[in-house]
Image (cartoon, coloured by chain):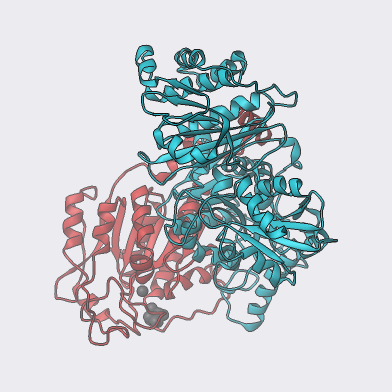
Chain colours: A red, B cyan
Amino acid sequence: MNRLKTTAPITWCPGCGNFEIQNSLEAVLEDLQKEGVPFKKIILVGGIGNHAKIVDYFHINSFSALHGRAIPAAEAIKLADPDTKVICFVGDGDTYAEGLEHLIFAAKRNVDITVVVHNNRTYALATGQFTPTSQKSFKGSTMPYGAKEDPFNPLELMLVSGATYIARGYPVRSQHFRKLLKEAIVHKGFSIIDVLQVCVTYNNLYTIYNKNLEEIEVSDPASFDEALKVIRSWNYDTGERPIAIGKFFEADRPSYEENYSRFKAEKGDRNKMMKDALDRLF
Amino acid sequence: MQHVSVLVGGETGYGVSDAGVMICRLFCRLGYRIYMYNDYPSSVRGGHQFVIVRASTEKVAGHSDQVDVVLAFNQDTLDVHKIRFHNHTVIIYDSEKVRIDGISQPSYGLPLGKILEEEGGKPVLGISCMMGGLCKALNIDWNIFEAMMQKHQTETVKKSLKIAHKGFEMAQTVDSLEVIQQPLLPVLSGNQAITLGLLKAGLQAYVAYPMTPTSPIAELLASLEPDIGIHVVLPESEIAVMMMALGYSYMGVKSAIGTSGGGFSLMVEGLSLAGQAELPVVVVLGQRAGPATGMPTYTAQTDLNFVLHAGHGEFPRFIIAPGDAEEACYWAGVALNKAWKYQIPAFILADKTLCLGLFSFDLSLTAELKEEPPVLWDGQGEYKRYQYTEDGISPLAFPPVEAQVVKTNSYVHDENGITSEDPADARAVADKRFLKEKNLAAELKDFETVKVYNQGKTALLCWGSNKGVCIEIAKKYGLKVIQMLVLSPFPEQALTQALQGIEKIISVECNGKGQLVTLVKQHGFKVDDQILKYDGRPFSLEDLENDVKKVIG
Ligand code: SF4
Ligand SMILES: [Mg+2]
């Protein structure tokens, strides 16, 4: 048995894109361990959805949170111990809908966590409703005649919100995806990877992705304008356009928890504190 | 004289509360025990605000409608509060803003604008001038006043004192407030007392979204952040507040969060996670008048039912309702300790009256508060986050742990924290939660979960900030007071004991439905009469006295 696996039975559908995310995470964690990041310093935080089962499958510290609410828990974990690597697994319904506020604010703060969005563009565990990134033609169980709303582009939102590492990946191109995943985890600051994780059961986009995906390299990762352009080149439709994958943006900005280094982490003498405070209030 | 009640009134935003604080500190330096009620509208500028400071030789925690001295910064102070004056009420007023036509009581006008202009003082120093007038009217030793000013007004003290002396010269002595020979006490708000209790018990992180009446806790802790080891985080919403607190708990960082009913509504989702995942968290909930936006700066005791039942699913919670500053401090610490010992959510159920009221704080009245270490893993064998134990408490370990993993889970889980839908696991984790509740209830038998004051065959049954006013009225009418300090787990045995020999029970609550009565009835107790107030204002002594008289006949 693999040392990173638990006894939890895997309950994803055969062919689900989550398997390759799992394999990639395993490979990246092994890699990082060789490079001096011990497993004990890794903390996985999960939202709720098929994606979130991943935290059960790893024999690694984990916090299985609530639908949409993984990110604030992850932020506090990082603040509590800045020496950890906190990786958040969230879904598109999970984080682009219900938990969007947290995603935006984590990017704004540039807290040093990694957010991996299993973007299968449907609520899969809830059995096939449409999400903020479902293509317009998507016939979900709650929109049987086709989605009534256009999708929005979450990476554009991440760019303007202040994320300092932004990428899109396709786990089927495993080497490319693993490179991105590792970069995102290593990056100091808020990282997000929008992962085109295919749900074979409710929104099987393998054919479209395999045909239209294009690995790109931006000439200047710190360029906001270039990032915006490449992010806007595809708006989560199902047209014939090339769908860019790769690292779109990476910038260097002090992370949130660095601001806390101003304050001592250890508890001072609380008896003295009490006396001083009462004295002040006399 | 050995007791006095002072009303200060003016426009919101012009230092009425500051004046109240100064008066409290001054009276405390004379050896008095004080209480201040602060009544202000939900506006930064422009409304009418007033405070009533009461000083007494004995502990007080309630205000009176009868005032002996009035400091009037605006006309409303006279017009609105005239009903509170008696024949000898002394009125000191800003003669440039207030007309005293038809007032027969002794009155001294201070031309604040002119005095401030002459001395080049900012408008806020008008307070000092009034304070000078107050000192003269009550024959308070100028040196005591000066010492208080030296300590709390360091920057502008010279100018303040000069301005104060002008007020002193323009008023006349009408009575002497005697110096009382007893230990001098500091002045604390309920919020400050809660904060100190939490810190004393080892608080390391405070997470909050701004909301009256608990915002001052975040403000105080933020100001202390560089001096003591604490994190203050102010995230995007109360939903994030609760989730961050739970993230901290998972890492072994003792956290608390503060809010009022509306903010707590958003925290309820995460509260349920705390229940399932057994993550400790302390919620400071300062109740205010709802539903919805209600009256944001006015008080209520309307969220007891909400807090008792908040969160889907069944899980234990520890709820305490302190009645004054000493209890707020002590029980806040107990809440933090027990939240961590039993890995459950704990509530400090306060209200605006307690949070923003000021009290003389006597540390000697409380038992000693210490940080209790939670049950920690002994490092032997494989770590199981939800290990089954005899008392239901699974030892804690916090990442990173050498060669072990810590898995916490919002799903039903096995001992290792892996998701499970097995009926045996489902029952086991539920039983584990119930067992913890039982053990907490058993441990609480050693605490004063129900307090009694005075003696009598009729009892006033109260909770939270009504304690002070109930005790005073009970003494006057020979009644017993039964104060429920712990509301969950329900202290059945302690209440039974407190009710020994009682023939009639009258409940006193600041809500319209009698929420405490509903709770005690659920546990088989009966209540004969209810005194309810739900207009956003706490009971004054006179309010309660009138209601009690009606009920006891
Ligand atoms: S429903 Fe879709 S996302 Fe869920 S496991 Fe099956 S294929 Fe994967
Ligand atoms: Mg999804």
Measuring from the top left, give residue B362's x and y in whole percent: 70, 35
Q: Quadrant of ligand 2?
A: bottom left
Q: Is residue A96 left or right of residue A13?
A: left
Q: Is residue B25 left or right of residue B171?
A: right
Measuring from the top left, give residue A11's x and y in whole percent: 48, 81
B273 or B41, which is in the foreground? B41
* Residue sitting at x 43%, y 22%: B125
A173 or B44, which is in the foreground? B44
Whether residue A36 is visible here, answered yes or no, is no
* Residue sitting at x 74%, y 62%: B505
Is B26 above or below relative to B285? above
Is A146 above or below relative to B174? below
Answer with the quarter of the image where residue B10 lies. Answer: top left
* Residue sitting at x 23%, y 83%: A146
Measuring from the top left, give residue B311's x and y in whole percent: 55, 68
Measuring from the top left, give residue B280's x and y in whole percent: 61, 57
Looking at the rendered structure, the number of numbered marks drawn on it comes to 0
Q: Quadrant of the C terminus of chain A?
A: top right
Q: Quadrant of the N terminus of chain A?
A: bottom right
Q: Is residue B186 left or right of residue B169?
A: right
Q: Is residue B474 left or right of residue B66?
A: right
| Farthest-out residue, right | B501
Whether residue B50 is visible here, answered yes or no, is yes
Answer with the quarter of the image where residue B64 lies. Answer: top right
| Farthest-out residue, left | A240
